[in-house]
Image: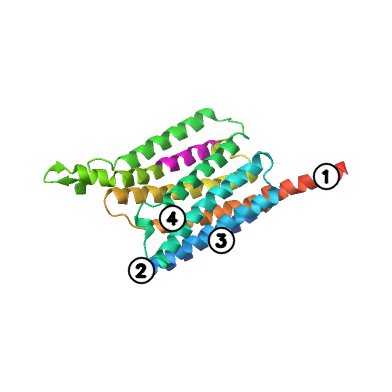
Amino acid sequence: MANESSYKKTLKYLIILMVLSIIVVDLSIILIPDEHFQHAVAIISLNIAGATATGLGIIAVVRHGISGSHGKSYLFLTIGIALWFAADLGILYSYFVLHVDEFERITVLDMLWYSGYLFLILHLISIIRTIRIRNLSVTITIISAIIIGSVIVNFGDFLPLRKSFIVGGEIDVAEINDELSNFAVTILYPILDLCLIVPSIIILSNIYRDYQHSVPWVLASLSLLVNAIADTGYTIDYLNGSASALPWDLFYIADFIIMSGALYWYNKYHITDHISKKNKRNEFIN
């Protein structure tokens, strides 16, 4: 009971801190009247949030090590977040040094985001391998609902064809060919988000009774959900021919802040407990 009371107290303050951070940062950006300055502040804020999450991930890996399933899990998670942060650093460099807004174009930075998804998926798979699937029917029902909803939301905007593709009542084949690669790259994001959300649901629906372990997964899953909302919104804007960094940057900032909360919990409880047990084993052996 004492531990659970400590968990609840920490969680309360952690949630307050995360919510206040998101509100303060997002409102500070929204209230900036100048569009260019607003975008610049959003990019800087995004990178600060990304650096924080990456730093907490690195601390987790250093403290825990990479041995065992959990060690690999922390490593995959940290690499995934670091790759996303590297892509955001690329946006920062392009905007302030090259004076190019990479957010509105398909570039090599997308490969960094794609790679980040790969490692985050590996992270989720490594966690699933350590848990027992108890609620199979509930898990399947929730996953099915999410997949169907995602397909409806993301793919419902594909048709009819964008007006820019149609010239004089006929389909402009040249225009379609020019934008086909951009379209394919952009639409992959909601698909990759689904690859993150589905295993997250599997984990959440099977460890939610374990208070200590469920908290970071609730936070991490919420983080991925916020990221999915932003990707979906940006994809819809792109399909409508109005791709823009805002307001979706605000969601990505919140994504990193919430993930930082999950990593803080990992460091404070999971890894600290692991180190404590490891030290006790070493003392017993010696």
Q: Are marks 3 and 1 in contact (CB under 8 Å)?
A: no
Quick one: label 2 or label 4, which is nearer the N terminus?
2
User: What distance separates the C-alpha of mark 3 from that of mark 1?
Assistant: 37 Å
Is residue 31 in view from this perspective? Answer: no
Q: Which of marks 2 and 3 is nearer the N terminus?
A: 3
Dot 3 corresponds to which residue?
Answer: 17
Discs 1, 4 touching: Cβ within 8 Å: no
Label 2, residues with CA under 10 Å away: few <14, some 14-19, many ≥20: few
Most extreme residue toward the left, as rendered? 168
Q: Name the residue under label 4.
A: 251
**Which sits earlier in the primary sequence, circle 3 or circle 4?**
3
Does the segment drawn in magenta span residue 102?
Answer: no
Q: Is residue 134 above or below residue 2?
A: above
Labelled pair 2, 3 in contact (Cβ < 8 Å) = no
Look at the image and give the residue range highlighted in magenta. 191-202
Label 3, secondary structure: give it: helix
Query: Identity of the amino acid at label 4?
Result: Phe
**Picture coordinates of residue 39, whole percent (x, y):** 39, 65
Measured in 3D between alpha carbons, the distance from the residue under mark 1 to the one under mark 2, in whole angstroms, is 57 Å
State the mark number for residue 18: none
Q: What element carries label 2?
A: helix
Most foreground residue, 265 or 285: 285
Q: Which colour scheme is used?
A: rainbow
Q: Which mark identifies residue 282?
A: 1
Residue wearing tag 2: 36
